[in-house]
Amino acid sequence: MKEKEFDISVRNLLEDAEMPVSPKVWKGVSASIAPRKVLVPFWAYAMAGVAAAAAVAVGVFLHRPADNVIPEGRALVAEAPVINAAPVEATVAVPITKQIERLPASAIAKAEPRIAAVQDIIPVSSVMEETSAKEEAVRREVTAPVKGSFPVEASIEDDNAAMNQLAFSQKKTKKGFSLSATGDIQNKARQSFARNGFMVPAVKQVATEQGIYNATPEVAFGMPVAFGIGLNYQFSERVYVGTGIRYSWFSRTFVGDYYDEDLFPYENRDIDNFQHWIGIPLNIYYDLISSRYWHFHTFAGAGAEFLLSNNYRVHHTPQDVTYKDKTTYPPLFSVGAGVGVEFKMSNTVGVFFDPSFRYYLNASKAPRSIRTVQPFCVDIEAGLRFYL
C-alpha cells in the first residue's frame, strides 16, 4: 500500500470521531446563529461568492495529498479535525501502538517496515513510560494534602489549645529587660469651695513661730500629675515585674494666715501650696491574652513615696512671699491593682495604657493634699515601653 493509501485509511478510521458537547455550549451556539432580519445589498452576495471561490481554490492547493516520504526520526501520528469540541482540562496523547491496533490487519502488515524504522528512533515503550509518569505526577499533585492544614474534625479543646499556642508563638517579645517612659494623672473628685464661702476656723491658732496658721477648706485642688521611667523584667511568656522612679506633683489653694517674726502677720491671704514627691513603685504583671501585636494584662503592686519639698506662696501686695516647710514627714505607702493593654508598634517598641485603683495607707501623716483628703483614688498611667 502506498503512503497516500495508508493516510486515507487512517483518515477514514477517524472520519466519524466526535466528542460530546456540553448543553451550555450548544445553547450559546444556537443564540449566536439565531436568524436576524438584516437587509443585505446585492454587492455583498457577489463579494461572498468571490470569497468562497477563492477559499475553495486555496483549500485544494494546500490540502492535496503529499507524495513526500516521512522524514526519519518522526513518529507517525494521524491528525483529524475535531468538530464542536468543548474545552477540556487536560489532553493525553494516544500512544502510537493504540493507533496501529485500530488499523486493518492488511494495513499493519504493509506498514511494519516503516513502524520498525520509527521504533528504532523513538521506542514505543519509552513513549508509554513517559506518558504514564506524567499522568502519575499530575495525580499526585492534585491529591497531595496541603501542608500545615488542620484536621477536618477537631474537638473544642483542640481548637482552644491550638489558638493559645498560635497566639503565644506569634508573640515576638523575648524574656529579658525592657525600659518604659510613663506619665499618669489621678482623679480629684472632691468638690472645691467657692472663694466667697470659705469657713473661718472656730478657734484661731496663735502664731508662735514661722508658718501657716488658721487654714480654711481648700478653694481648689490641682490635678495630680506624675512622670517616670521604669525597668521591667520578664520571667516567662506571661509573668514579669516592673519597678522604677516616679516624680509626682500636687497643688492646692486655700485661705489662711502666715506669720513671720521679721514681717507683719499676713491674715486671710490666698495661699498656694506645692508638693513634690519622688516614688519607687513595684508591680507584678500577668498577661491574660497575648499576641504578636498586642496583649491584655492585669497587675498589682505597692509603692513608697518620699517628700522632696513642701512650698507655700502667700499672695500679698506689692510682692508675694514664699515659705518653705522644713518639717520631716515619713514615707507615704500605697497599694494598687488594675488592668491594662499594650499595643506593639514593632518588635522593640510598644505603647501601653494602665488604669488602676490605688489606696494610700498612711495619708494622715503626710502634709495636707488631695491624698490626705481622698486616700482612695483612680490612677491612669500611659507610656512607651522599649524592649532590649
Image: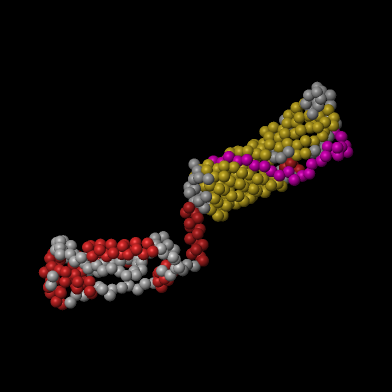
In which quadrant of the rendered view does residue 329 lie? top right
Q: Does the stretch in magenta take in 192?
A: yes
Query: With 275 as the anchor, is 28 left or right in this view?
Result: left
Query: With 204 as the anchor, is 241 left or right in this view?
Result: left
Residue positioned 27% across, 65% down in the render? 56
How far across and down, in percent of the image, does residue 100 sit? 19, 72
In which quadrant of the rendered view does residue 69 lie? bottom left
Number of numbered callouts drawn: 0
Residue 97 visible in the shown view: no
Quarter placement of the N terminus: bottom left
Residue positioned 78% across, 26% down in the render? 320
Query: With 227 as the anchor, is 7 left or right in this view?
Result: left
User: What range of the chain is rendered magenta?
Assistant: 179-205
In the foreground, 73 or 376: 73
Which residue is the extreme one toward the front? 42
Q: Does the stretch in magenta take in 360?
A: no
How far across and down, in percent of the image, does residue 313 sit? 76, 30
Q: From what the image shows, is residue 323 above or below residue 363?
A: above
Which residue is the extreme one toward the bottom? 105
How far across and down, in percent of the image, does residue 346 sit? 50, 45
Which residue is the extreme one toward the left? 113
In the foreground, 344 or 118: 118
In the foreground, 88 or 175: 88
Which residue is the extreme one toward the top? 262
In the foreground, 93 or 144: 93
Query: With 256 as the anchor, is 327 left or right in this view?
Result: left
Residue positioned 68% across, 41% down in the render? 332
Q: From what the image shows, is residue 327 above or below residue 114?
A: above
Residue positioned 49% across, 67% down in the render? 155
How far across and down, in percent of the image, does residue 37 sit? 45, 68
Residue 50 visible in the shown view: yes
